[in-house]
Amino acid sequence: MTETTLQTQELRINMGPQHPSTHGVLRVELVTDGEIVKRAIPHIGYLHRCFEKHAENIDYMGVMPFVDRMDYVASMNNDMGYAMAVEKLMQVEIPKRAEYIRVIMAELNRIASHILAIGTFGLDVGTFTPFMWCFRDRELILDIFEMTSGARLLYNYLWIGGVWMDLTPGIEEKIKEFCDYFEPKIDEIDTILSYNSIFIHRTANVGIISLDTAISYGLTGPNLRGSGKKWDLRKDEPYSVYPELEFDIPVGSGEQGTVGDCWDRYIVRVREMRESLKIVRQALKQIPEGLFRAPIRKVRPPAGEAYTKVENPRGELGFYIVSDGSLKPYRVKAKSPCFTAISCLDEVSRNEMIADVVAIIGSFDIVLGEVDR
Amino acid sequence: MKSYFLNIFKSLRSILKGMLLTAKYAFTKKATIQYPFVKRELPTRTRGQLFCNIDDCIGCKLCAVACPVDCIYITANKKGPTEEINHTSEESGKKPRRFHLPQFDIDFTLCCWCGLCTDVCPTNCLYMTKNYEFSAEKRQQHIWQYGEGHKPGPKTEFNRPGDQLKLYVD
Amino acid sequence: MTLEDIFKKLKEKFQDGVLELKIPDEKYKGDAFIMIDAKKNHAVLKYLKEEASLLFDNLLCISGVDYKDYFSVVYHLHSYTHLHKVVIKVHLQERENPKLDSAFDLWKGANWLEREIFDILGIHFSNHPDLRRILLPDDWEGYPLRKDYKTQETWHGIKVGM
C-alpha cells in the first residue's frame, strides 16, 4: 500500500515581462507558499534606452524630445522639469504668459494621466467599462493638445525659455468646454467604480504602507499622500505661478479601510482631478498678454550644477544637470518617482495573495518608460 | 444579525446604482468612429511627415545640425564663379541660392517627429504635412529623397558617388 | 537652518571629515554644496539624519558623475520636519575600483539608487545587501557612463550599436 506524502515547498512563479497587468515590461519574481506571497522581487531594465548617455552627446534643446519619452503619459510635466532645471542654471526670466500656458498644459496633462491610471487600475481589478469611459474622455484632452502643439502623446512643446508657439486662437473656449463637460464625469466614476462594494473589497486593507516606510523609501506624490502626509510641491515649495492659484491637497484618511491602502492611493488621484480642473479654470481667467518665449540666442549655461524638482502626476521628478560651459550637457541625471515606488514592492506585498500583488502594482501607477529611462 | 442583512443591502445597492448608469449609456450615441472608412479632421498644426521644397532651400544645413537623431543627410556643392545664382521664392524672402543640392535625404526610420528642424529653417522650405499613412514593406523605402532633379518620394538609387553619407540598403 | 549653520555644526563635530563649503561665484553657478571626505561618508550622513536639529529624513537623490580624473557621488537631502535641504558631495580618487560606504541602513530608498550607480559607473558600495546590475543585463561588460567607455562588439551573438 502506498502512502502519498504531502510536499510543501516554495513555488517560484514568474510574472513575466509580457503581462497584461504590469503596466509595461516589468518582471516580478514571486516566491509563494501556495497562494500567499513570501517575496516579490522586481526585475527592471527591459525598456532601458540609455537616456543619460545620449544626453551627453546632444545639445540642450535636442535633449527635450528624449525627456518627453521618459514618462510618455505625462509628457508636458517632464518637459517642464527639464526646462526649469536649465533655466535655473542660465538664470533667465520667463514671460508671465508663458508660465500660465505651461501651468494650463501641465494640469491638463495631469488630468489625462490620472484618467489613464484610474481606468487601467479598474481594468487590472476586473472591470472593463470604466476603462472605456476613461479613454473616451482622454481623447478630448489629446485633441486639445493636438491643436496646440501638433502631437497627441509626445509633445516637445515646453521649450527652454517659454513655449514653442502661442496658443491657437479659439483654444481657450475649447478648454472651458472640456472643463464643463468633464466635471460630472468624475461623479460618474465615483458611482461606477470608487464606491462599488466589489471594488472596495478588492482594494481596501490591501498593500498598506505606513508613513515611516513611505518616507524611508522616498515615496512621493499620490503614493505618499495616500499614506496620510499632506505634502505637495505645488503648495509647499511652489514654483512657476502656483502661488497665485487656489487649490486644495487631498490626503488619504483610511475611509474604507486603513490609512495607506490601495483604495486611499486611488481616491487621492480621483480627488486631485477635481483640483486640477479648478486650477485650469483660474489660470484661463488670469492669463495675461505678452511674449510666449524669452529671447534667448543660444542655450549655453555657465559652468555649474543644479537640481530642480517638479510635481509630476506620479510623484516628484528631479533633474540634476552638470554643465561645463559648452553647448552640450556634461551630465544629466533624472530621478524618477516610479523608480523608488517599485523598489518598495517587496516589502509591501509580504503575506498578500497573488491577486493582491496585481492590485498593489496598479495602485502605484507606474510607467516603465520612467523607471528604466 | 441586523448588520449582516444591512451589509448585503448596501453592497447590492452600490452595484445596482452602477449598473443603472451603464444601462443609461446603452441608448446614447456611440463614441467610436469607423476608421479607415471615416477619418478624423486633423488640426492645422499637426506634425506629420516632413516635406522639403528644394527650390526654396539655401543649403545652410541648420536642420541637420538641430536634429537630435541625425536623420537628415545633405550634400551641398558650392556653385562656381561663372554659374548663375537664382533666388528663393517671394514668401521666403528672396534669398540667394549659392549651392547645388544633389542629396537631401531624410531617414524616417530615425526621425522622432519633434519638429526642431522646421523651427530653425530660415526660409520655411522644410515643413511638416498632415500625412501619417506612409507604411512600407522594406526598411529602405522609408528613406525619402527631396534633392534637386528627383521627384519627392522613396529613394531609388543608393550610395551614388559624391553622396554625403552611405545609406542602409537591404 | 541656513547652509552656513549646517556647515558650522558639521565642522564642529567632524573637524577633518568636512572639507569645504562651496558657494556660487563667477566661475561656478547653481547650487551650493558641502564637500566631505570619502572615509567619513557614513558617519556624516548618520549624524545628518539623526541629530535633532537637522533630521534629514528624506533622501531625494544619489547621483554619480565621472570627471575624467576622479569620480563624484552627490547626495541631495531634505527634511520634512525642519524644511531645509543640503547637498553633500564626495570625491573618489581611484579609477580602477572605487569604493564607498552604503547608506542603506539610514534610508531604504538608497538601495536601488546605489545599485544604479554601481551598474552604470562601477562604484562599489560596501555593506549593501544586494549589489548587482539593475538596468543592464547581468552579464554586460563595462560601465557605460564612464567617459572612456567603449561599447562591446557583440552580446550573445547580437551586434551591439548601429
Image (cartoon, coloured by chain):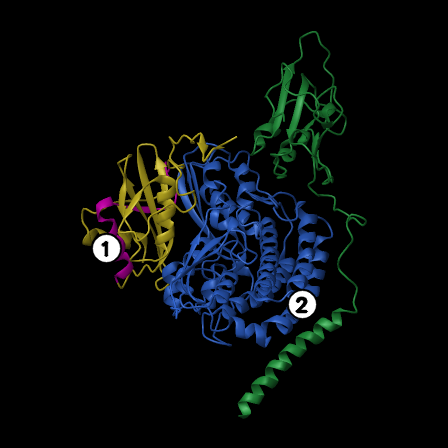
**Which residue is pictured at 26% across the width and 36% down the height?**
C94
Q: Is residue A174 left or right of residue C23?
A: right
Q: Residue B73: where, in percent of width, then height?
A: 62, 25
Q: Is residue A71 above or below residue A32?
A: above
Q: Mark 1 points at which residue?
A: C9
Q: Which of C157 and A126 is in front in this view?
A: C157
Q: Is residue C55 left or right of residue A134?
A: left
**Which residue is pictured at 72% across the width and 57% down the height?**
A173
- As drawn, the chain in green is B
In the picture as drawn, the residue positioned furthest to the right comes out as B37
Q: Residue A160: where, in percent of width, then height?
A: 54, 42
Q: In this view, does A22 lie above or below C134?
A: below
Q: Residues within 10 Å of mark 2 (few under 14, many from 20)?
A: some
Q: Which mark's residue is nearer the viewer, 2 or 1? A: 2
Give the residues in magenta.
Answer: C25-51
Is residue A6 in the magenta section?
no
The picture quadrant where one finds residue A332 is top left
Disc 2 residue type (three-letter): Lys
Q: Colour of chain C?
A: yellow
Q: Is residue A280 above or below residue C11?
A: below
In the picture as drawn, the residue positioned furthest to the front comes out as A1
Q: Quadrant of the N terminus of chain C?
A: bottom left
Instruction: Give the SS element for disc 1.
Output: helix
The mark found on residue A185 in the picture is 2
Q: Which of A72 and C53 is in front in this view?
A: A72
The picture quadrant where one finds residue A246 is bottom right
